[in-house]
Image (cartoon, coloured by chain):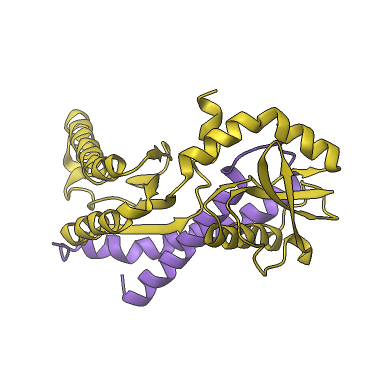
Amino acid sequence: MIHLYGVVEELEALPPVDGVGAEPLERRRIEGLELVVSRTALEGSDVTQAAVLSHANVVEALMARSGAVLPARFGHAFSDEHELAAAVRTKASALARGLTLVRGCVEFGLRVLGDDKAPENGSRELSGRDYMRARLAEEQARWRLAEELHEPLARLSRASARFGGASSDLLQSAYLVPRQEVDVFGEHVRRFEAAHPHLTIVCTGPWPPYTFAANGEEDA
Amino acid sequence: MSMSEQQTLKQQVTLLELVDRVLNKGVVVSGDITLSVAGVDLVYVGLRVLLSSVATLEEPRERISAAGAAP
């Protein structure tokens, strides 16, 4: 079986890290695309925390040594070289578009946890209608606050995505940020954090562009 | 929330974000992703533990704001 870590561009040399199951990394070139793989005894379906972390570790190391990396999603092992080559050939143009999109960018994740403020006191005494009004006003305030943070960050980014409709998080999002904009991006987040000290903001990154790796397929 | 609680929370969220990216994001070259339910459950049990610790850490902050100490 063959485990795929990602499609890379301008990779100088393989990083000195082990792949999933301590297997050595190998390179493949298919349809002009450069891939990093390792042999594996595992089926794609063998998900363990260690395997997931190894995969992430390899992609991270590739990120440091490549012009661009399109991280592969964990969860499929190719049965042999033929299956791998056929799959890459089928997706070659989408993969090339994906590389173009993420080139020169890193990803940042943002979570603003929980609620902005505690429930209004005395809410028990409100009538049903007033309660609904108060809830609506609260929701609108949350929405405005999320917009205030998200909108300028999205404008700095080459692409952005928001998640977690049902989540209680105020904002859960990802941004594909050109490297030269990373400082400005961080500055925006820090300023928002300082202006809203009661919010718990977790900004993670720079990540390899996992969230945007499949975007090349959408333009097909 | 104390600085060390804040630090722990941020580390937990970072791990959660990492696993979410590796399992749910990234490009699918093969056309089919065949995660076994058992395997995914293993990883997500880990995630639920993380999420519940996040919820636990949220409580003190809410109590403080309810007491009117928040700005």
Q: Residue A197 falls in which quadrant of the image?
A: bottom left
Residue at horizontal 74%, vertical 48%? A28
Between residue A34 and residue A61, name the one nearer to us. A34
Task: Please identify which colour was used for chain B in the image.
Answer: purple
* Location of the C terminus of chain B (image quadrant): bottom left
Q: Residue A59 falls in which quadrant of the image?
A: bottom right
Task: Please identify which colour was used for chain A in the image.
Answer: yellow
Residue at horizontal 43%, vertical 40%? A164
Residue at horizontal 37%, vertical 49%? A178
Q: In the rendered image of this protein, does residue A99 appear above or below residue A185? A: above
Residue B32 shows in the view: no
Residue at horizontal 47%, vertical 61%? B14
Looking at the image, residue B59 sits to the left or right of residue A8; the answer is left
Residue A88: x and y in percent read 71, 35
**Which residue ends up furthest to the left in the rendered image?**
B71
Residue A44: x and y in percent read 77, 46
Residue A188: x and y in percent read 23, 54
Between residue A141 and residue A213, name the one nearer to us. A213
Looking at the image, residue A163 sits to the left or right of residue B20; the answer is left
Between residue A49 and residue A209, name the one nearer to us. A209
Residue A2: x and y in percent read 80, 49
Residue B54 shows in the view: yes
